Amino acid sequence: MLENSFGLFFYLKTTKNQKEGLRYVYLRITVDGKYIDLSTKRLCNPNRWSTEAGRATGNNEAARTLNAYLDTLTSKVFQARKMLIDDDKHVTAETLKNVLLGKSTEKRTILEVFEHHNKQMEALVGKEFAPLTLKRYKTAREHTQSFIQWKYKVDDFLISDLDFEFISEFSFWLKTARGCNHNSAIKYMSNLKKIVLICVNNKWLKKDPFQGFKLTKKEVVKNPLSREELKRLTEKVFEVERISQVRDIFLFCCYTGLAYVDVKHLKRTDIVIGMDGDPWIDTTRQKTDAPTRIPLLPGALEIMDRYKDDPQCSNLGVVLPVLSNQKMNAYLKEIASLCGISKTLTFHIARHTFATTVTLSNKVPIETVSKMLGHRSLKQTMIYAKILDIKVSEDMKALKEKLRNF
């Protein structure tokens, strides 16, 4: 950034206990009234020095050599000033000195900025960010670190060296070495982009290396349970109690739309009496920290009642005895096989089933479904509405009937 006033001149300086003889030539740089002095490490006889010109007098070789050096130093000061202006940095006597001494740029690194960002985010968890958001950024930093070590054989990477090649190679590495699908890779790339933009906005990086890189997610076709599959799963009797419990928890999510992490942490105190006098879930989504209020359907109430005396639930104060996500999904594969369901059952499928088969297909308005799912925008819920072939069929039948009577 351009200064208001700028000046420089050379002068002879008398050091301590120095009364006669040669004097050292010093450079004084003044910017906006503040100055700094630098030794040129060159000597000159005071009798052969012009205070007004700031140069040695005479035409001998010593004078010519000294003056040529001082001219070169002057040129370097103006070059340093131009560099600071081009980089949109403050021009001060101190910053000019740092440039001349080779200390012009602070060596910031991408992992250092990433870590600083994550620590700030951690301090705001529960206020501005959800715990899962922080977890994703921490994972993104770990991926970035692993990529840097793999690709460049170093522990960190200078921000100033970030370019489009780094971005595109990182994306490719996520999909190959890390085995991320396209949308997961894009999520991690988006996390990195936020860090890069911090660097750009702070003028640590001149150009956004993401320019020209597409961060577009692919639309994923959801595959919820049909009414018939949901009925089959509900009526199936299992001989093993643990499998029966996992089925119940999955069905509870089909009736409430809760994600795995939300049903795992669902406390009995989260069940309240709503304004209609019926039981509701009143909680906050772990992923987005968005409030979620859901009236409990009869099927969900029946499952809750089944575990009201469960020792694990009573000790922990939770609604259902939820296992680890890995174990739950392993049991769900077995459950699908026993029920003759070819779809891969996961808790994402349960949430999709609530959004489509249980609610939207039964004419529950999409605005209501969006609110119960804890979505921050209707656009998120529209993804579910797109896959309702049954709903499309019913709407078109109604239209055909109207056209017949037209």
Image (cartoon, rainbow, N blue to C red):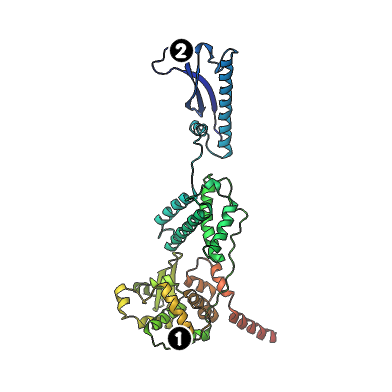
Front in this rendered view, residue 20 or 204? 20
Amino acid of disc 1 = Thr
Q: Quadrant of residue 132?
A: bottom left
Tag 1's secondary structure? Answer: helix
Q: Is residue 110 left or right of residue 311?
A: right
Q: Eyeballing the image, is 38 above or below 51?
A: below
Residue 274 visible in the picture: no
Tag 2's secondary structure? Answer: loop
Mark 1 or mark 2: whose residue is earlier in sequence: 2
The residue shown at (43%, 81%) is 247
For disc 2, the neighbor class at 10 Å (few under 14, some 14 to 19, many from 20) is: few
The residue shown at (47%, 56%) is 141
Query: Which residue matches tag 1?
Result: 234
Query: Which residue matches tag 2?
Result: 21
> The C terminus is located in which quarter?
bottom right
Q: Is residue 62 left or right of residue 115?
A: right
Query: Which x, y percent locates residue 256?
Result: 45, 76
Q: Quadrant of residue 325?
A: bottom left
> The N terminus is located in which quarter?
top right
Query: Which x, y percent locates residue 309?
Result: 31, 81
Query: Which x, y percent locates residue 207?
Result: 59, 47
Amino acid of disc 2 = Gly
